Image (cartoon, rainbow, N blue to C red):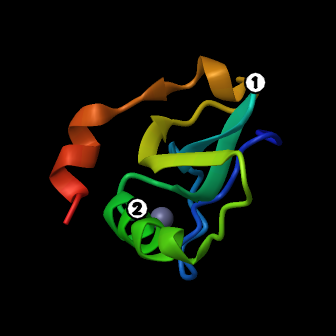
Amino acid sequence: MYGHGVNCSHPYCSDSATYKVAARWSHGRFAELKTYGFACSDHLEEVFQEAENRRPDYTLRPGEVIEEVAIYRFEPGKRDRQLQRVWGLEENYRT
Ligand SMILES: [Zn+2]
C-alpha cells in the first residue's frame, strides 16, 4: 500500500497529487515554501488559479517576503528545496 501520498486539493477528487502549488516565503535568512494546495494533473489549473486568487489575502509582517505562486512537481518524501519547479505549466495557467 502506498501510504505517504497526498491527495489532490480539489473537493471532489481523491486522486494522488502529482503537483504542489506553493509560493516561496522568506523572512531574513529563513525561507520555506508556503503551500496553497496539491493537485493531480486534471485539477492543476483550478488549484493554481484558486491559489493565485487567495494570495493577496495574506498580510505580510515586516521583513517577510512572499514570491509569486508557483507549481512544483510533487514527490512524496522529498524536501521542499528538492522539488522541481515547473515553469512551463505556470505560464499556461497564469491569467
Ligand atoms: Zn484532482
Which residue sits at x=59%, y=52%?
16
Q: Percent x, y for residue 24?
A: 57, 40
Q: Which mark is residue 81?
A: none
Where is mark 1, residue-wise? 29
Q: Which mark is residue 48?
A: 2
35 with respect to 83 (left or right)? right
Local packing at callout 2 (Cα closer than 10 Å; few below 14, some 14-19, many 20+) is many
Seen in the picture, residue 18 relative to 40 is either above or below; the reply is above
Q: Nearer the viewer, residue 7 or 73?
A: 73
Q: Nearer the viewer, residue 62 or 36?
A: 62
Q: CA distance from mark 1 to mark 2?
A: 27 Å
Q: Nearer the viewer, residue 27 or 36?
A: 27
Badge 1 amino acid? Arg
- Secondary structure of residue under mark 1: loop
Q: Percent x, y for residue 35?
A: 65, 53
Q: Percent x, y for residue 57?
A: 57, 77
35 with respect to 95 (left or right)? right
Seen in the picture, residue 30 relative to 33 is either above or below; the reply is above
Asked if the residues shown at circle 1 and circle 2 are in contact, with their CB atoms under 8 angstroms apart, the answer is: no
Q: Is mark 1 within 8 Å of ligand 1?
A: no
Which residue sits at x=80%, y=40%?
4
Badge 2 amino acid? Phe
Which residue sits at x=61%, y=30%?
75
Local packing at callout 1 (Cα closer than 10 Å; few below 14, some 14-19, many 20+) is few
